[in-house]
Amino acid sequence: MVLKARLARVEQRISEGRPSIVAGGRRLAHARHHLDDAGLSLDQWHTKWDAARWLFTADGESDAHAGIRGR
């Protein structure tokens, strides 16, 4: 039930032309505009932003099992 509700929200945001760029992006954007309230320096915020962006990065080769050759 929870996953279906999340999916519905994501599909609605996409149809409205407002997709998320990174996991937790809205929360991170809010923190960026309120660094003092979030207890973060700009460098700390950038570290969190970069970490969230890596969640969507995949390494390896598309035609290799699990991105690894020789299996």
Image (cartoon, rainbow, N blue to C red):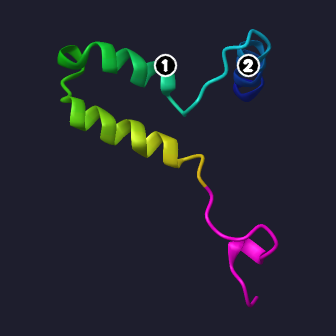
- Relative to 64, is 9 above or below? above
Rendered position, 27 above or below 71: above
User: Image point 69% across, 23% down: which residue?
Assistant: 6
Q: Which residue is mark 2?
A: 5
Q: Magenta segment, which residues?
A: 58-71
Q: Main secondary structure of the magenta part?
A: loop
- Residue 58 in the image, given as x and y percentages of width and height: 63, 58
Amino acid found under the numbered disc labelled 2: Ala
Residue ID at (71%, 21%)? 10
Q: Position of residue 48 (x, y in %)?
A: 35, 38
The 10 Å Cα crowd at callout 2, few under 14, some 14 to 19, many 20 or more, is few
Q: Residue furthest top?
A: 16
Query: Is 52 left, or right, of 65 in this rendering?
Result: left
Q: Which residue is mark 1?
A: 26
Q: Residues within 10 Å of mark 1 (few under 14, many from 20)?
A: few
**Residue 16 pos. (x, y %):** 75, 9
Up the image or down, 52 lies above or below 42; here it is below
Instruction: Identify which amino acid the numbered label 1 is placed on.
Output: Arg
Q: Earlier in the sequence, mark 1 or mark 2?
A: 2
Is 61 in the magenta?
yes
Q: Does 41 lie within the magenta span?
A: no
Q: Is 67 left, or right, of 22 in this rendering?
A: right
Whether pointer 1 and pointer 2 mark residues with C-beta atoms closer than 8 Å, the reply is: no
CA distance separating discs 1 and 2: 18 Å
Taking the spot 72% from the left edge, 84% from the top edge, the residue there is 69
